[in-house]
Amino acid sequence: MTYRHKVEVMLTKEEIAEKVKELGATITRDYSGKEVTLIGVLKGSFIFLSDLVRAIDMPVEIDFICAKSYQGTTSTGVVNVKMDTILDIRGKTVLLVEDILDTGKTLSALRETLLSRGAAEVKIVTFLDKPARRKIDISADYKCYTIEDRFVVGYGLDYDEMYRNLDYVGEVILDG
């Protein structure tokens, strides 16, 4: 594929598959016998969530919420919910599934929203954790990888809606 920017591979599709499989087994162990609802944060989490639910060996409900706070490589600081959940989560355990936890603003706002709707608990599941960018005191309950402060794409992560379809995670090398 030809894109506008150079992308250096950080995580291969094989490494990702193995880590997601491990995380699915951990979630299965931790929640065996319990009712769990996974809510994917669109658009970035859709590939991770798809792979993760297939690695979880128990019944789960799945829903989505669409929130946006980035333009290009920069967080706008404002979390906009563009599409809301459908399922009733009152009294349920919710795993909020995101592609990347960086500033924490989006996940913090969404967690509070879901708790205010009566969720029994909301746990954060993220593919990538980037603590160097954290602006809000929030941490992932489950994560695949912790990364340095680099702008990454692929496996659902985008740069202005591009690169999501890469089957690996790579760092975007911006010119100039």
Image (cartoon, grey):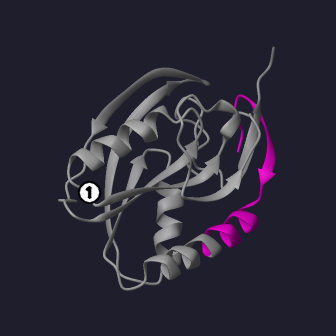
- Residue positioned 34% across, 79% down in the render: 34
Q: Identify the residue under disc 1.
A: 119
Residue 9 belongs to magenta span: yes
In this rendering, the count of numbered labels is 1
Report x, y in % for residue 120.
28, 61
Identity, as a three-letter code, of the amino acid under mark 1: Ala
Q: Which quadrant holds the N terminus?
A: top right
**Left or right of 10 in this view: 43:** left
Observer-nearest residue: 59 or 54? 59
The image shows residue 56 at horizontal and vertical percentages of 48, 77
Residue at figure coordinates x 66%, y 69% from the top left = 17
Q: Specify few, some or many for label 1: CA neighbours under 10 Å numbering under 14, 14-19, or 20 or more.
A: some
Q: Magenta residues?
A: 1-21
* Vertical arrangement, residue 14 with respect to residue 58, above or below: above
Against 64, is 27 above or below?
below
Describe residue 20's horizontal placement relative to residue 88 as left or right. Answer: right
Does residue 36 appear left or right of residue 171 in this picture? Answer: left
* 145 in relation to 158, above or below: below
Q: Nearer the viewer, residue 149 or 91?
A: 91
For mark 1, give the secondary structure: loop
Asked where in the image residue 79 lies, by quadrant, the reply is top left
**19 displayed left or right of 25:** right
